Amino acid sequence: LLLLTLSSGAMGAFGFLIVFCLIFDSRSLACGPGRGFGDRRRPRKLAPMSYKQFIPNVAEKTLGASGKSEGKITRDSERFKDLVPNYNPDIVFKDEEKTNADRLMTQRCKDKLNSLAISVMNQWPGVQLRVTEGWDEDGHHLEESLHYEGRAVDITTSDRDKSKYGMLSRLAVEAGFDWVYFESKAHVHCSVKAENSVAAKSGGCFPGQSQAILEDGRRKYIRDLKAGDKVLAADEAGQAVFSDFLLFMDYDTKTQRQFTVIETAEPCRKLRLTPAHLIFIHNSASEVIVTFASKVRPGNKVLVSEDTPGLLSTATVERVYTEEHYSSFAPVTTHGTIVVDQVLASCYAVVEDHKWAHRAFAPVRFGHRFTSTFLPEKRQNLTCQRDGIHWYAKMLFHISCWVMDAQSFHPLGISNLN
């Protein structure tokens, strides 16, 4: 009777309580990734970066770091509106030009800088973060410098104690800058990816034109799935089942994203999914394991559906490449799996542990069973979702950050959640 009287807000709070207990229950954490995952996280001792060291260990303008330059931004540029001022009182801006240009930066750069400012005050009480160079409109840097786009800052501490700069560099890495370089004895250089680059590569989804297989054998576009649909999936034993569609973890009708394409020859199948999405493959011992789509290579074996509905078999990956498509959707089913374009994939992304993710979505399955039994007229509302990441998925991510190491997450998977 109590459950019947719960409002939607109370149901959300109830779900939070369940997932909180689920995540911190030692039995649930026993299978989690990483050493000592079930134990309380101990503070990690940070090591200062070495002079001239850069992280990640690739060139700044490569895909694995901040990415290529997209051209200078001037005050007359259309893109100038994308720069935002930073008036954080905990940051000292040198502002040599007296134009406040150093305060202008992209939103991503601002977010990382504000996070670093907190870390600096915690590391050295009474000391603040100092920015010596931000957006540059005067041409003081090399032609393709990210300073011209508001994507780079040069930083020191407010006391200008050079002995602190190695640790300052490490704190910048921890704050989430996409590339950090202990460039000189006078400052540390930090930069971030372009806003559209982050959106294009992040998340865990399928393009909208991908298709699921319904119980009656019909195909349906992923974007058109609704409450009540049963789609082809697989159970824990790897057997084909038809599973209830629950909701979209991510629903984006506008953004152009980069998708990994996994193609098999016999039978011919082609699955498109974002790099941070999980997929099932057979290893050399014929065991089914879960990995990120970005790790799949030719020669791996994936599970595909036969032309006869309800049967799954293995197929060898022949090609892996990338494509770009507009719109992306991340459906969740009761079994946590789904066959998309006749290839079996997980419903989950970002963390390379399908079982952990499936346990974490137990409250969603509980809510589905509850509404199906007691409030069937409300089921349709569960899948009515505006563009964006579902609140529950965002909440899980932030809770996970407390209990898991950063290495547990796919870097492209969390970019749009930071």
Image (tube, grey):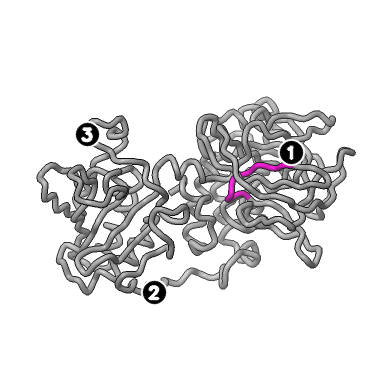
The amino acid type, in three-letter code, at marker 3 is Arg
Across and down, in percent, residue 279 comes to 68, 51
* Residue depicted at x 72% and y 34%: 211
| 215 over 97 or under it: above or below | above
Verify CB contact (< 8 Å) between mark 2 and mark 3.
Answer: no
Element marked by disc 2 = loop
Element marked by disc 3 = loop
The amino acid type, in three-letter code, at marker 1 is Asp
Query: Does residue 110 appear in the picture of this structure?
Result: no
Q: CA distance from mark 1 to mark 2?
A: 46 Å
Give the class, few, some or many, for how many residues have Cα within 10 Å of label 2's Cα (few <14, many ≥20): few
Magenta stretch holds residue 272: yes
Q: Looking at the image, which residue sits at the far right? A: 308
Q: What mark, if any, has residue 75 been given in the picture?
A: 3
Dominant secondary structure of the magenta stretch?
strand
Q: CA distance from mark 2 to mark 3?
A: 43 Å
Element marked by disc 1 = loop
Q: Is residue 83 left or right of residue 332?
A: left
Magenta stretch? 270-277
For marks 2 and 3 on the same chain, the one whose residue lies earlier in the sequence: 2
Across and down, in percent, residue 16 comes to 54, 48
- Residue at the spot of label 1: 341
- Residue at the spot of label 2: 45
Magenta stretch holds residue 168: no
